[in-house]
Image (tube, rainbow, N blue to C red):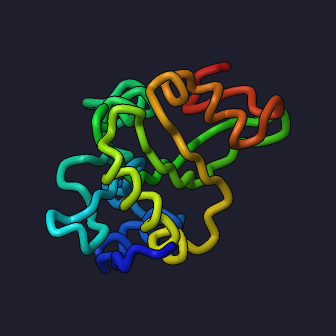
Amino acid sequence: MASGVTVNDEVIKVFNDMKVRKSSSSDEIKKRKKAVLFCLSDDKKKIIVEEGKQILVGDIGESVDDPYACFVKLLPLNDCRYGLYDATYETKESKKEDLVFIFWAPEGAPLKSKMIYASSKDAIKKKFTGIKHEWQVNGLDDIQDRSTLADKLGGSMVVSLEGRPL
């Protein structure tokens, strides 16, 4: 069931900027988003970029020590969100980067919010072409342990996430 919710153009721009890894100057790389949250507009008709809920690549090592832990802290405990996380990880063979689409629907979120976010998920996913990894998370227990994300990315093949061994 579709909800009739539309996706704001800024959301698509953010996704395309995160997806395309063109060779850039170090200043441009620092401005690239590592993680971002999307929410419904106040009138519940559009999916928008959530103000102030992002991590830039340039923040890592400056104001952000562990980007994954920092991303988890951005999630509201009592409402739903969509997120994009640019995971950097190593397998036994190589270093990789993949975008992960996250549907955050915590137990404490209002039922109406869960329903609108769940029925609007396809609208945003259709705009995010080429996403390999989708992850529905229903609480902090599911997301706090980085090994859960590593399982989504490649299971036992993944040996480190964000430079931290598993």
Residue 51, given in percent of the width and then of the height, sits at 18, 54
Judge left or right: residue 147 versus residue 115. right
- Relative to 148, does residue 10 appear above or below in the rendering? below
Q: Can see residue 107?
A: yes
- Relative to 24, does residue 74 appear above or below in the rendering? above
Kindly give the residue lying farthest to the left in the view shown.
42
Tell me which residue sits at (24%, 56%) in the image: 50
Residue 96, given in percent of the width and then of the height, sits at 68, 47
Residue 14, given in percent of the width and then of the height, sits at 37, 67
* Residue nearer the viewer, 162 or 74: 74
* Residue nearer the viewer, 129 or 24: 129
Tell me which residue sits at (39%, 73%) in the image: 3
* Residue nearer the viewer, 42 or 88: 42
Judge left or right: residue 92 versus residue 153. right
Q: Can see residue 22?
A: no
Residue 83, given in percent of the width and then of the height, sits at 42, 52
* Residue nearer the viewer, 112 or 36: 112
Judge left or right: residue 57 versus residue 148. left
Tell me which residue sits at (47%, 64%) in the image: 121
Tell me which residue sits at (55%, 32%) in the image: 162
Judge left or right: residue 69 versus residue 9. right
- Relative to 158, does residue 132 appear above or below in the rendering? below
Name the image quarter holding the C terminus.
top right
Quarter of the rendering containing residue 155: top right
